[in-house]
Image (spheres, rainbow, N blue to C red):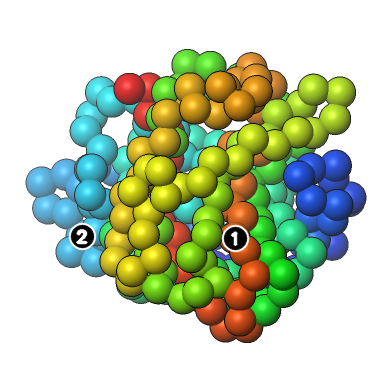
Amino acid sequence: MKRAGYAVLLLLAACRPDPGVSDYENRGPLNHSDGGTEPDPEVLPGPFPYQTGQRRLGVGFYEGGRSDDIPVDNTTTFVYLYENTVTMEPSDTRVEGRTADLLVHAGKAWLGFGVHWNTPRNLSTWKTLHVSLNSSDPGFASVKVGMNYLDTTDKSVQLDVEKYGYRNDGEWHHLAIPLADFTAGGLKLNVVSAPFVFIAGQGAAADKLLLDNLYFTAE
């Protein structure tokens, strides 16, 4: 993973008043294969490896094979670190690809970041959001995953991930969140402006969580 310097970005009316900066300008080349006959032993396939013919959408934070991809390019697609509540760094403790992302708490009353699109996109053909999380630190005992949509202003629907199997126990948990649960909360899938938002509660500085294996499927 390659990371470029910070870039100050325009204020965005999202679920928080100040999205902060983008710290994900250049992840470097990602692996788009399903491993082939001689897979690179350094590239982990993930708990549910991609199979040719499947529909799988990557939106950043995913290095495996996929049928569709909307990369973070820092031109139309960004990762916003909300109000300097979190920093991110690569980690080789992962379940997929070559690296995971290590979220480091800034010690504030809350923590958040999100993948944001300048122009809303239609995700109505996708059914499930997948993500893998791992932490035992108190700052990540309460975690929500959200999606934003444009309805005059940017609005957010956030779900408590404990319902989908996350535990704050230092183990990897592979979550599969139906998009129908977001739409039940009011999300409009045809005008999604942020496909992935991550929110945690108050924590001590340097509390950590590993995040990996983020993608959407049509099943």
Q: Is residue 1 visible?
A: no
Task: Determine the residue positioned at 34% across, 48% down.
Answer: 165
x and y percentages locating residue 66 in the rendered image: 36, 36
Query: Which sits in the foreground, 4 or 208?
Result: 208
Task: Determine the residue positioned at 39% across, 65% down.
Answer: 168
Task: Determine the residue positioned at 46% across, 76% down.
Answer: 137
Structural crowding at the residue carrying mark 2, measured as other residues with C-alpha within 10 Å and reported as few (<14), some (14–19) or many (≥20): few
Q: Looking at the rendering, which quadrant does residue 157 occupy? A: top right
Q: Is residue 140 visible?
A: yes
Spatial separation of the CA atoms under disc 2 and disc 1? 34 Å
- Above or below, comparing residue 109 to residue 112 in the picture: below
Query: Horizontal placement of 181 versus 24: left or right?
Result: left
Q: Are marks 2 and 1 in contact (CB under 8 Å)?
A: no
- Above or below, comparing residue 43 to residue 62 in the picture: below
Query: Which sits in the foreground, 200 or 48?
Result: 200
x and y percentages locating residue 207 in the rendered image: 53, 78
Q: For the residue marked with disc 1, what is the amino acid? A: Ala
- The disc at residue 200 is 1
Task: Label 2: state its secondary structure.
Answer: loop
Q: For the residue marked with disc 2, what is the amino acid? A: Asp
Query: Which sits in the foreground, 73 or 122?
Result: 122
Task: Determine the residue positioned at 33% across, 22% down.
Answer: 219
**Which label lies toward us, 2 or 1?**
1
